[in-house]
């Protein structure tokens, strides 16, 4: 029986198969990198806000406690965003005529709330409760980064599930004394292993990786 295909087709077939595998792997790798890039996660991206609020100034320079603006952080799922009244606690007098604060006074005048842009925006299928974490000894900077050094707020971490699970698997690495939860300058190295173990026991911290904790 005469040969149907030329012998060179063997080489062409091998090159085609390996080429397909190579480019499929390359496309998968690019997709993986893209999913973890700031373009997708928005990590490190400063979003425009109606008012250029500086955590570096208010938290770092002045020393305002997180709870002054985020007043529901210890009880609710949401930490709460500062209302116009909260801003005016200071700025009804301080820098009242500054153009930067024009929208605050406009909000007071017309009764419309300030529409802040959400920086840390978890997917709808993920559940997070600020009160649970704060009362378990997990500090603000653990998730939000060095807020006292941010002129404008940005998302410090990826918020990917694997990032969350690192803490859920090893909570002892991140727990801190209750009176240090809102301290933006607290360092994990400031407590020894014995104190860390005592905090873990006091808060009944365990490795919690069941799906239902975050996906409800």
Image: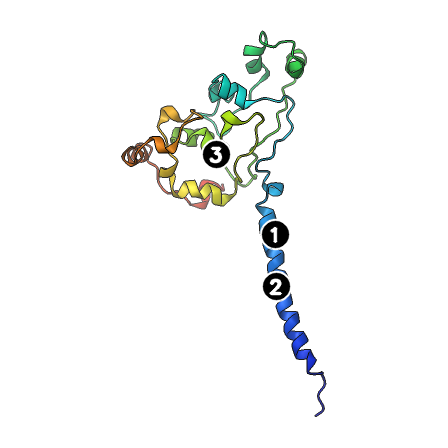
Q: Which residue is mark 2?
A: 22
Report the mark closest to the observer, 3 or 2.
Answer: 2
168 to 31, vertically: above or below: above
Q: How many marks?
A: 3
Instruction: Name the spot of residue 10 as percent of width and height, x first.
Output: 66, 79
Instruction: Name the spot of residue 76 as percent of width and height, x first.
Output: 47, 27
Callout 3: few (<14), some (14-19), or many (20+) C-alpha neighbours within 10 Å? some
Q: Secondary structure at mark 2?
A: helix
Q: Which residue is mark 3?
A: 143
Whether tag 1 and tag 3 are in contact, CB under 8 A, the answer is no
Question: Is 56 in front, or is 104?
Answer: 56
Mark 1 / mark 3, whichever is N-terminal: 1
Instruction: Name the spot of residue 189 as percent of width and height, x first.
Output: 36, 33
Q: Secondary structure at mark 1?
A: helix
Q: Which residue is mark 1?
A: 31
Callout 1: few (<14), some (14-19), or many (20+) C-alpha neighbours within 10 Å? few
Residue extending farthest top: 93
What label sits on residue 39 in the rendered view?
A: none
Whether tag 1 and tag 2 are in contact, CB under 8 A, the answer is no
């Amino acid at each position: 029986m005469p040969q149907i295909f030329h012998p060179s087709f063997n080489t062409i077939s091998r090159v085609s198969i390996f080429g397909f595998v190579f480019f499929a792997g390359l496309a998968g790798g690019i997709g993986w990198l893209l999913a973890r890039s700031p373009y997708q996660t928005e990590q490190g991206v400063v979003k425009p806000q109606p008012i250029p609020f500086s955590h570096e100034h208010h938290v770092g320079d002045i020393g305002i406690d997180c709870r002054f603006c985020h007043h529901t952080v210890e009880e609710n799922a949401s930490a709460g965003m500062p209302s116009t009244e909260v801003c005016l606690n200071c700025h009804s007098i301080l820098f009242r005529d500054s153009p930067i604060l024009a929208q605050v006074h406009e909000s007071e005048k017309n009764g419309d709330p300030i529409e802040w842009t959400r920086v840390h925006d978890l997917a709808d299928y993920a559940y997070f409760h600020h009160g649970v974490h704060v009362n378990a000894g997990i500090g603000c900077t653990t998730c939000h980064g060095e807020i006292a050094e941010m002129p404008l707020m940005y998302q410090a971490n990826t918020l990917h599930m694997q990032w969350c699970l690192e803490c859920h698997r090893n909570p002892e690495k991140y727990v801190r004394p209750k009176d240090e939860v809102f301290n933006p300058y607290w360092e994990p190295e400031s407590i020894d292993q014995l104190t860390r173990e005592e905090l873990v026991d006091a808060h009944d911290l365990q490795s919690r990786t069941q799906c239902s904790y975050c996906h409800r």
